[in-house]
Amino acid sequence: MVQYDLVIRNGRVLDAESGFDEISDVGISKGVIERIAQNIDPSDATDSIDASGQWVIPGMIDTHVHVANASDLGRIRGLGLQMVAAAGATTVIDLGGSMDALVAGITARGSGVNVGSLGYLKPGETVPEGRLSPDMILDIVGTALEAGSLGIKLWGGYYPFTPDETARFISTANSLNAYVAYHVGTTETGSRLDGLREVPALLGSTGRVHVAHINAYCRGSILPIEQEIHEALEIIDDLRDQIVSEVHLAKPNFTLGKCDEDGNVLADVVGNCLRLENYEPTDEGIRAALRDGYASTVEETRIGLVLVSGERSVELFDAGNTDVPMSFPVNNATTAFQLTTARNSSNEFVIDAIGSDAGALPRNVNIEQAMRLVRFGGLEPLELVLKLSLNPAKMIGLGSKGRLSEGKDADITVIDPEAGSASYSFVAGEMIMISGRVVGSGGTILTTERGEKTVKATGIPYERVDLTQAMMYAGRD
Ligand SMILES: [Zn+2]
């Protein structure tokens, strides 16, 4: 009797919520995990996959990707959706995107992954230039929600607001139960440790926020790196009930090369990276760093975006009129390791999740790097699942994802522990990736009640998320 649509057989099934870690079969029907047991008869299933020697984990959820920036409306439309699926993700959050670009991306090159978006706040585009009143801020956050976004992303390191405006954006998002992510930095601080130091004052005693990529603020620009790591962990642990956070594990950072008419770099991050290696924070400094191979930009190839440096990259920089993605090898591996594995005095992880800050950027390495940490002994296998699946699901308030147990969504990532990378992934029981090759299409948009009408009108499938259940509001348990 055919009872299951799919059985994944003989894998090492890992579920961080229950602590389950056994060789088992997983029977899936109608997009849901129906049974986890040994010796499910493959003849009871329409399809079956032998996962012997592999790890079967709840679908990897990446709470920090970039798949649909407004500037992606051009030729790289949707490419990031392919790249995240190739790396084993089943659900992603576009941390500062445009719903129009997301809809266009899913239509053009959807990979079957679930995607939620946070509206980006950029003066002159989504936000008026000049000072913002509380009413204007309420209107801006409401507009993002109505468009279908889960909330907002404050891009402090790039488009800083005053501390008052920043605090108001956070408290307004909180009052609307919207998701709010913050890349630190205001007009008074930067995308550095000083930006993180400012967070307690911005939140007061009640504010809640997702602080993005903690490692990006520990690059040694204010104190020696070890001290920056220590202080960052202290700040985050002190605000444990108010902050959720992630760290990424890739060496290259990504930023924007854009310079003003006098040739001065606009992004704080680019200036910091250039100064670290004694280059001028100007277009000429960028060209020199590109020629020397310290800086890179990206170019699209058949396998996705790749990093380029040298003369070719200077051509691309000039062809793009300086407004091109830039990358510097500034993310410190020690920092990534320490932040990922750090625990507080109650033996809880200080930082909740691993997020790639990738997507359309060529560094979707969550699984590869986390598997290296497991091999080294820095993370136990179930802790890897906690950081890649369960905590990210909790961060978004997705009660039926991030868990591999009966009745939960059949979003599953299979990892080959020898290769240290994802070998298959499934969304709602449908295979979307095999051996790095994306076979899924379309996608499901995660939205809130306020965005439902707009998203429904796009014709793209959607799922309504209740953000009162998100970790920043509901807590960790
Ligand atoms: Zn980012």
Image (spheres, rainbow, N blue to C red):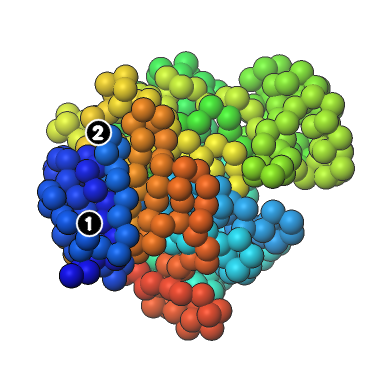
SS label for mark 2: helix
Q: How many marks?
A: 2
- Residue 124 vs 266, above or below: the answer is below
Distance between the alpha carbons at the discs numbered 2 and 1: 27 Å
Q: Is residue 459 above or below residue 367?
A: below
Amino acid type for the residue under numbered disc 2:
Pro
Q: Local crowd at mark 1 within 10 Å, few (<14), some, or many (≥20)?
A: many
Name the kind of residue labelled 1 in the image.
Answer: Pro
Task: Using the image as rendered, state which of residue 248 and residue 191 is in the foreground.
Answer: 248
Residue 370 higher or lower than 131, as above or below: above
| One can see residue 305 in this view | yes
**Residue 214 image point, x, y percent:** 43, 36
- Residue located at (71% from left, 38% from top): 298
User: Up-down: is 190 above or below 222?
Assistant: below
Res 321 quadrant in image: top right
Rendered residue at 44%/61% (across/down):
114
Where in the figure is residue 206, as x and y percent of width and height?
Answer: 30, 55
Badge 1 marks a residue whose secondary structure is helix
Whole-percent x and y of residue 296? 71, 30
Residue at numbered disc 2:
381
Q: With 3 as the anchor, is 393 left or right in this view?
A: right
Label 1 C-beta lies within 8 Å of the nearest ligand 1 atom = no
Towards the viewer: 149 or 13: 13
> Which residue is drawn at the image coordinates 14% and 44% (left, top)?
20
The residue located at (64%, 42%) in the rendering is 303
Taking 250 as reference, is 98 left or right? right
Q: Is residue 377 left or right of residue 431?
A: left
Q: Which residue is mark 1?
A: 42
